[in-house]
Image (spheres, rainbow, N blue to C red):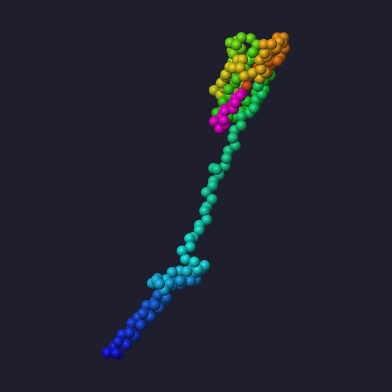
Amino acid sequence: MITSVLLYRAVFAIAVAAFVSGCVNTAPQSTAAPLDCDDRYTRCAVQSEQGSKGKALTIPQQNTSSSDDVSVPAIVPPSITPVLFDFDSAKTTHLELSEAVAFLIMYPEARLTLHGFTDPVGREDYNRALSYQRAAYVRERLLMVGVSSSQISLKAHGENDFIVAELAADQILSRDDLIEQYAPNRRVEFAFTHPDTMAQAY
């Protein structure tokens, strides 16, 4: 009886030894990282070279920026000196329109408003009509050199927005002196707009 028990225990010990030896021998061999077999578990895990477990792997983020992010310079309309007119005249020889022409032809989406003005000498209704004629004169000169009529609009201001303020009633000047004094008021101003710019104040 005792001999049978001892024989049984010997066979069981041999079986356990064979099982443990099989775990070690059948585990994948790796030269990159040693095995970490924890006694509390029945499986073997690969141990990292640093000896840490469960460490998150950080993957560097790729640069997703593209050439589409390059900013486009804003379109800047030209600053045109107002065109001045002689007294009671809707025509002038003081025209310098090259910058305005170049901008309007280069940017067909651009728009130009011509603002006409007069001095305070004369009737108000007459001066409003005269201010329109001055703006129309400048428009015709722009059309003659190739600017599209759809790009130009006119606005008549008459006796408004003076550069030189109207003299008080007690300030007496001769007519010729008044005409010379008010010369900056007799003008046409340029105001450009473009979809890629803010409205330009005249």
Q: Quadrant of residue 74?
A: top right
In percent of the image, x 43 and y 72: which residue is there?
38
Which residue sits at x=70%, y=12%?
171
Q: Foreground residue, 73 or 87?
A: 87
Horizontal side of 144 relative to 27 (left or right) equals right
Quarter of the rendering occupied by the C terminus:
top right
- Residue extending furthest toward the left: 1
| Residue extending furthest toward the front | 170
x 62%, y 21%: residue: 189
In the image, residue 89 sits, relative to residue 3, either above or below, namely above
Residue 172 spot, x, y in % from top left: 71, 10
Give the magenta-colored segment's residue range.
190-202
Relative side of 186 to 58, left or right: right
Check residue 192 for magenta coloring: yes
The magenta stretch spans residue 20: no
Q: Nearer the viewer, residue 81 or 119?
A: 119
Would residue 140 be visible to someone looking at this image?
no
Res. 19 in view: yes
Image quadrant of residue 19?
bottom left
Please provide percent x and percent y for residue 120: 64, 13
User: Which quadrant would residue 143 be assigned to in this image?
Assistant: top right
Task: Examine the residues drawn in magenta and state their main secondary structure.
Answer: loop
